[in-house]
Amino acid sequence: MPGFLQVGYYYFFSSQVRRSVVYGEQPRNRLDLYLPVSIDEPKPVVAFITGGAWIIGYKAWGALLGQQLAERGIIVACIDYRNFPQGTISDMIKDASQGISFVCNNISSYGGDPNRIYLMGQSAGAHIAACTLLDQAIKECGEGDDITWSVSQIKAYIGISGGYNITNLVDHFHRRGLYRSIFLGIMEGEQSLQRFSPELMLQDPNVGHAVALLPLIVLFHGTGDYSIPSESSKKFTDALRRVGAQVQLILYEGKTHTDLFLQDPLRGGKDELLQDILAIIHAGDAHALSEDAKAGPRRRLVPEIMLRWAHNISPF
């Protein structure tokens, strides 16, 4: 709570946050923008899809990440989307695609560089973002119309603690309280699980041309994650390599589902995941990499003893 109150104050009162920018017609078609203090030149952009088990996702969950990256000269767009039961996975992917389209086509008016857009998702958001990216690539190969953004505009996809083979996670989620009947409702029935499993979509010989369009894919996962086991990212990495995609896998020993996204950033100091994300976004930018290296440790937001309690009692 001490850390969340500080992040909440930043979210609601900082002049660097543009909340609830409209990108579509649905009630949840809103996004939050986190802007650097100084925009003296076009800045790299992260289009971020938050997690939340497809049920409790909300754009504000990205506030801490948005603040961190904005401090390093990166614009972050946290894209909201319909949750279940307001929508099912098809609606979530449609919303994410519309949000990405808005970013690609409008971010220059906020000081962003439309040629340096990175798609990122965490947990369920990583799954939604991966599905959206693959769907877009398939559309661009002639299997769809109404194309309002292009995969070529995405410099890299960054997936944090994601699940990419939904068929392998049904029983796991059921044991952890996301019951089979609810999860199958989210995923539009058992017959649709393969359709919404990016790892399995790659096995379809008809998506070969679409795979060739994909940008660099970087997957992050903690080996102590018991919400979505790190095996999910490992197997997706293997599947991507088999079809010739560019992919990197970075594992964090002993880190849980929330350690990477909550506890470590709240801890302050040097954040390993943040440093790895910055290395991807600032690759080839010698000045930005130099500034990253000189940046001091971030301020601690929560006492260590409270973070250790959180680590031990968190159900995630």
Image (cartoon, rainbow, N blue to C red):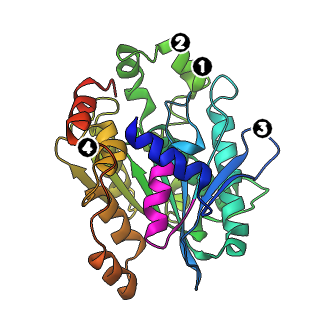
Instruction: Tell me whether circle 1 and circle 4 mark residues in contact (CB < 8 Å).
Output: no
Q: Magenta span has 31? A: no
Spatial separation of the CA atoms under disc 2 and disc 3: 26 Å
Mark 4 or mark 3: whose residue is earlier in sequence = 3
Q: Residues within 10 Å of mark 3 (few under 14, many from 20)?
A: few
Amino acid type indicated by mark 3: Pro
Residue designated by label 2: 181
Q: Give the quarter of the figure containing the C terminus.
A: top left
Q: Residue at x 31, y 63 (%)?
A: 276
Q: What secondary structure predominates along the stretch shown in magenta? A: helix
Instruction: Tell me whether circle 2 and circle 1 mark residues in contact (CB < 8 Å).
Output: yes
Give the label, 1 or 3, closer to the camera. Answer: 3
Residue designated by label 1: 185
Q: Residue at x 40, y 21 (%)?
A: 173
For label 4, the SS is: strand
Q: Residue at x 39, y 27 (%)?
A: 169
Mark 4 or mark 2: whose residue is earlier in sequence = 2
Give the label, 1 or 4, closer to the camera. Answer: 4
In percent of width and height, residue 113 lies at: 60, 77
Instruction: Tell me whether circle 4 and circle 3 mark residues in contact (CB < 8 Å).
Output: no
Amino acid type indicated by mark 1: Gly
Amino acid type indicated by mark 2: Ser
Mark 1 or mark 3: whose residue is earlier in sequence = 3
Residue designated by label 3: 27
Give, as a single range, the part of the protein colored magenta: 63-76
Q: Which numbered circle lies on residue 222?
A: 4
Spatial separation of the CA atoms under disc 1 and disc 4: 28 Å
For label 1, the SS is: helix
